Amino acid sequence: MTADWIIRIVLFGIVHWILAGVMLYDLASRQKVFGGRKTVWALLIIFLPNFGSLLYLIFHPQILNPDSENNRRDKMD
């Protein structure tokens, strides 16, 4: 295995664990999640490197812009 591949694997791992940490923190702080099963989401985030985190982002887009959900509630009141 060349140094180039080792660097790629290490960077992939770093990206995965940063994304996983952010997603797991958001998952723990949410009351409701898509599908209603936090355990399944946590397993997907951890065991499907990057893909699980990206799926979570697709189904919970408010994580990228948390104020948008609060603004919608304020406008509805």
Image (spheres, rainbow, N blue to C red):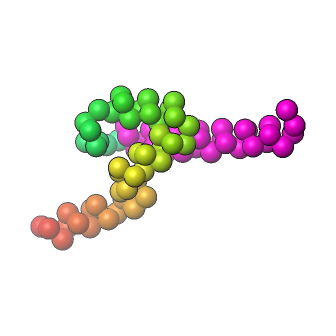
Picture quadrant where residue 41 is located: top left
Query: Where residue 33 sits: x, y (%)?
Result: 29, 42
Picture quadrant where residue 70 is located: bottom left
- Of residues 23 and 74, the one nearer the viewer is 23
Residue most toward the bottom? 75
- Of residues 52 and 73, the one nearer the viewer is 52
Magenta part of the protein: which range?
Answer: 1-28
Query: Where residue 10 sits: x, y (%)?
Result: 73, 38
Q: Is residue 60 left or right of residue 35?
A: right
Residue most toward the front? 1
Query: Where residue 73 sits: x, y (%)?
Result: 20, 63
Tell me the quadrant of the picture where the C terminus can be found: bottom left
In this rendering, the answer to whether 75 lies above or below 50 is below
Q: Residue at x 39, y 62 (%)?
A: 65
Q: Is residue 43 left or right of residue 12?
A: left
Mostly what secondary structure, the magenta segment? helix
In the rendered image, residue 15 lying in the magenta stretch gets the answer yes
Q: Is residue 27 left or right of residue 74?
A: right
Q: Is residue 12 visible?
A: yes
Q: Residue at x 72, y 38 (%)?
A: 9
In this rendering, the answer to whether 71 lies above or below 66 is below
Tell me the quadrant of the picture where the N terminus can be found: top right
Q: Residue at x 23, y 66 (%)?
A: 72
Q: Is residue 33 left or right of residue 58?
A: left
Q: Residue at x 55, y 42 (%)?
A: 50
Q: Is residue 31 visible?
A: no
In the rendered image, residue 19 lying in the magenta stretch gets the answer yes
